Amino acid sequence: MQSHTLNRSTQEVILEHLQKCDHLFVPSLSETVDLGSYSSKIYDRAQRVEVWDNEVLIGLIAVYLNQEEGKSFITNVSLMEEYLGMGIAGKMLNRCFDLLKEQSIESVELEVKKANHRAIKFYNKYSFIKSRESESSLFLIRNLLSS
């Protein structure tokens, strides 16, 4: 049975989840960050929208808030492979938007690698637009006030 929670996971559970999802990132997440340090940072500093299947963390969105500026940054969106295509990621993202609006956040931004076409298509579906780009990444933003 699936359940949606906020900030329930431990650092160890986050690390285990990221390891299970590592190969789904383009490039793999472990090629760009140290998963142990990254999971600690997410645990310590991020608000987390989580989806659990019984006692297994299957989906995670981690977002950093800057309440003074009314901005936020999604640092992680991950869902275990066997749960892809079920609408779970979209539900997590909408729950994240609700959480941010409740905290008076005006916009949310994220970075996605240009080579990750599936993720770009997904974010476009949820009204993210390009704010800037680097050689390898797009930075997408979504205004939360008009939605």
Image (spheres, helix red, strand yellow):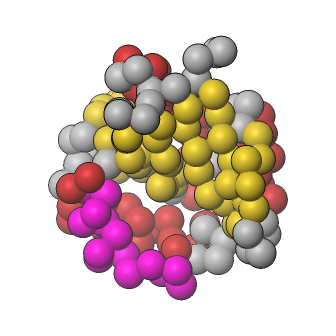
Q: Position of residue 119 (x, y in %)?
A: 71, 53
Q: Is residue 58 magenta?
A: no
Q: Is residue 26 above or below residue 117?
A: below
Q: Decide if residue 18 is on the left or right side of residue 45.
A: right
Locate residue 66: give its quadrant: top left
Farthest-out residue, bottom: 31
Locate residue 52 relative to residue 84 in the image: left or right: left
Using the rendered image of the protein, determine whether residue 73 is visible from the camera's viewpoint.
yes
Percent position of residue 43, x then y: 24, 55
Which image quadrant is residue 20 in? bottom left
Quarter in which the C terminus is drawn: top right
Horizontally, is 64 left or right of 41 in the view?
A: right
Q: Read off the magenta span.
A: 30-43
Residue 45 drawn at (x, y percent): 26, 52
Q: Nearer the viewer, residue 35 or 141?
A: 141
Residue drawn at (52%, 74%) of the image:
29
Q: Is residue 127 above or below residue 37?
A: above
Q: Which residue occupies the extreme front position in the image?
A: 69
Q: Name above or below for residue 45 compared with residue 8.
A: below
Q: Residue at x 58, y 45 (%)?
A: 109
Q: Main secondary structure of the magenta part?
A: helix
Image quarter hosting the N terminus: top left
Where is residue 145 shown, x and y percent of the image?
58, 17
Q: Residue at x 32, y 41 (%)?
A: 47
Q: Residue at x 78, y 66 (%)?
A: 114
> Does the rendering let one see residue 119?
no
Residue closest to the eye, 141 or 38? 141
